[in-house]
Image (cartoon, grey):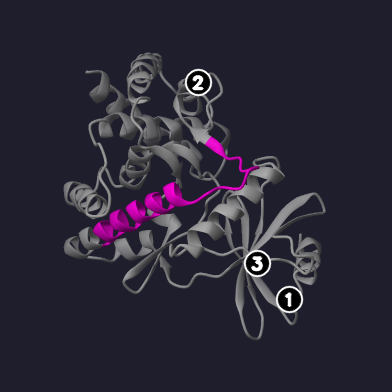
Amino acid sequence: MNATIDKAVHLWGLADVTYALVAARENAVYKVTTPTSTFALRLHRHGYRTNAELASELAWMKGAGDSGISVPFPIPSKTGDVMHVIDGVQVDVLTWLSGESLDVVLSRSDTKSRAAYFQTLGTAMARFHQICDEWQPPKDFTRCAWDAEGLLGETPLWDRFWDNPALSSADRRVLMAFRQAAQAALADHAKDPDYGLIHADLVAANVMADGPGLQFIDFDDGGYGYRCFELATALLKHIDAHDYADLQQALIKGYTSTRPIDLGHLDLFMALRAATYVGWNITRMGEDGGTARNARFITTATRLAKDFIG
């Protein structure tokens, strides 16, 4: 892969560089350092997004950044393009955001500080949604949709959670019943106008803390969806934390200080977000820790599904 990176840094006109792999989850992200600047070079996973979808993502990030949201900016190459396919790999270069991921910061913070970070996150999230509603996408803009079809259809964005091979018969019955109940609830919720562009993966690992401000990274799964689903995504991984109630209250307080939101279906979206991880992990159970992670995902999803369907 070094040959691909070497071609990329040349295409972007970056000289005297050093680079190091800093993330290898969905995409491979390299920290590229020159004598004067630092950048993030992304090698995108094969087949996940079309060129048009990636171009849309980069245009969206630039639009959000131009409007004051702290996100990575796409850097044009020497040809003026912000994305190239090199050796069959989609490549782009972004500005580097300093700081630490919020999950690291939260792990060493006391209860009061954790709540304060979540209030700040809620405010930033609401401002992001405002800007997304004000932004005019280009005519050829195309991104995925976290709607009823993307969450519960025959081919969901993150795979068919009810077909996870580790589900017991009882677990499968619960998730199938939840799927049916959630489809009915979303059909009613479709009348809610609070649907638009969302990041869709604002977990703490995708939020950078640098001083008092927060920055959003990794728009890989961003697209159209319910704003309440965005809040559920930020909350779900903390649902078993000792201070979860404080975190939830703080996130909502921060969000509603900037824009209103209907939280009447928050339980539905918490269960939906939990179910998506059961689907997401189907192809990842062979990874280190994948089996244990799968068990955790199933436990959380079935618990929230039971709570929702009663």
How far is mark 3 from mark 1, CA to CA?
11 Å
Residue 294: name its quadrant.
top left
Q: Earlier in the sequence, mark 3 or mark 2?
A: 3
Residue 307: name its quadrant.
top left
Residue tagged 1 = 14
Neighbor class of circle 3 (other Cα within 10 Å; few <14, some 14-19, many 20+) is many
Q: Are marks 3 and 1 in contact (CB under 8 Å)?
A: no
Residue 112 position, x and y percent, is: 17, 63
Mark 2, secondary structure of its residue: loop
Q: How many marks?
A: 3
Q: Quadrant of the N terminus?
A: bottom right
Q: Is residue 182 magenta?
A: no
Give the magenta part as a residue range.
Answer: 117-144
Q: Earlier in the sequence, mark 2 or mark 1?
A: 1
The answer to whether residue 203 is visible is: no
Residue tagged 2 = 153
Q: Tell me which residue sits at (49%, 30%) in the image.
A: 279
Main SS of the magenta part reads: helix
Q: Amino acid at mark 2?
A: Gly
Residue tagged 3 = 75
Above-or-below relation of 261 to 308: below
Residue 170 position, x and y percent, is: 35, 15
Neighbor class of circle 1 (other Cα within 10 Å; few <14, some 14-19, many 20+) is some
